[in-house]
């Protein structure tokens, strides 16, 4: 049994989407002085590896705390993206109802560079609609977003209660593997939250 961590670290060096607040970590309990360590953390709820709930872009959509826990766990499928999302390539993959589909673009190689936010491939609406037809649970990407403004893919998926995982890493380690995904966000009563995303190799 092998587990692969698909999450980035959340700290003051974590890149954030342009315009989002930077992560701040302040020590408020010092072990040598207070007998314990404690920290005050400030970050946007879409910083680092995180999950978008429907309310992120859909009026009246569910917040994360209203999502059933079973939606965060499922059979994983990893699909390689070479410069663009190819619908015909996606159709060749065995995607089943309830799957968590991850797209490996390789953008993590430039995670700390401007290109990570400027030059990523955008998923087409056709691919998003195909995933809706397949009735998947979640869609994850190793990018800052599966699409660009005005974010049509977000709306297609979230309208159907298909959650979105952004800023994944280590997806190359899933190539050719059968695995399950455990993507557990903080139970916040808002539109998204950081998550520890783990793949369990079967």
Image (tube, helix red, strand yellow):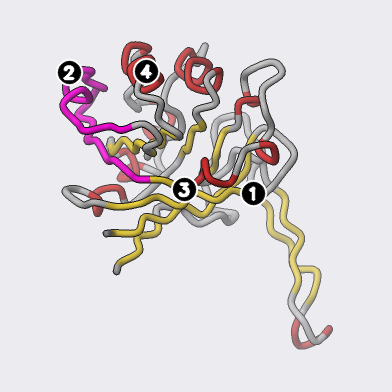
Q: Is mark 1 in CB contact (under 8 Å) with mark 4?
A: no
Q: Position of residue 161 (x, y in %)?
A: 55, 26
Q: Position of residue 32 (x, y in %)?
A: 76, 88
The residue mark sitting in front, 2 or 3, is 3
Pointer 2 local density, CA inside 10 Å: few below 14, some 14–19, many at least 20:
few
**Circle 4 SS class:** helix
Q: Is mark 1 in CB contact (under 8 Å) with mark 3?
A: no
The residue mark sitting in front, 1 or 4, is 4
**Sequence-first tag of 2 and 1:** 1
- In this rendered view, identify the residue nearer to me: 98 or 122: 98
Q: Position of residue 152 (x, y in %)?
A: 48, 12
Pointer 3 local density, CA inside 10 Å: few below 14, some 14–19, many at least 20:
many
**Sequence-first tag of 2 and 4:** 2
Task: Give the numbered dot on residue 23.
Answer: 1
Along the horizontal axis of the image, is 8 left or right of 40?
left
- In this rendered view, identify the residue nearer to me: 60 or 27: 60
Instruction: Farthest residue to the right: give it.
Output: 34
Task: Give the numbered dot on residue 133.
Answer: 4
Q: Position of residue 70 (x, y in %)?
A: 53, 45
Q: Is mark 2 in CB contact (under 8 Å) with mark 3?
A: no
Q: What residue is shown with label 2?
A: 88
Query: Which residues lie in the magenta part?
Result: 75-96
**Circle 3 SS class:** strand
Q: What residue is shown with label 3?
A: 73
Q: CA distance from mark 1 to mark 3?
A: 27 Å
The residue mark sitting in front, 2 or 1, is 2
At 49% from the left edge and 28% from the top edge, which residue is drawn? 162
């Amino acid at each position: 049994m092998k587990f692969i961590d698909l999450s980035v670290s959340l700290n003051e060096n974590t890149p954030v989407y342009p315009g989002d607040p930077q992560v701040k970590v302040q020590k408020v309990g010092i072990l040598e002085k207070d007998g314990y360590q404690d920290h005050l953390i400030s970050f946007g709820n879409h910083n680092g590896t995180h999950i978008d709930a429907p309310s992120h872009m859909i009026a009246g959509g569910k917040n994360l705390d209203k999502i059933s826990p079973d939606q965060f766990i499922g059979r994983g499928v990893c699909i390689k993206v070479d410069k663009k999302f190819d619908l015909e390539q996606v159709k060749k993959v065995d995607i089943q109802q309830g799957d968590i589909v991850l797209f490996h673009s390789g953008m993590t190689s430039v995670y700390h560079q401007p290109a990570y936010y400027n030059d990523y491939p955008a998923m087409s609406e056709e691919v998003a609609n195909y995933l809706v037809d397949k009735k998947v649970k979640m869609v994850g990407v190793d990018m800052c977003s599966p699409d660009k403004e005005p974010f049509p893919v977000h709306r297609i998926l979230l309208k159907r209660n298909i959650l979105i995982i952004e800023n994944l890493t280590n997806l190359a380690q899933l190539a050719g593997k059968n695995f399950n995904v455990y993507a557990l966000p903080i139970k916040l009563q808002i539109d998204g939250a950081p998550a520890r995303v783990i793949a369990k190799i079967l």
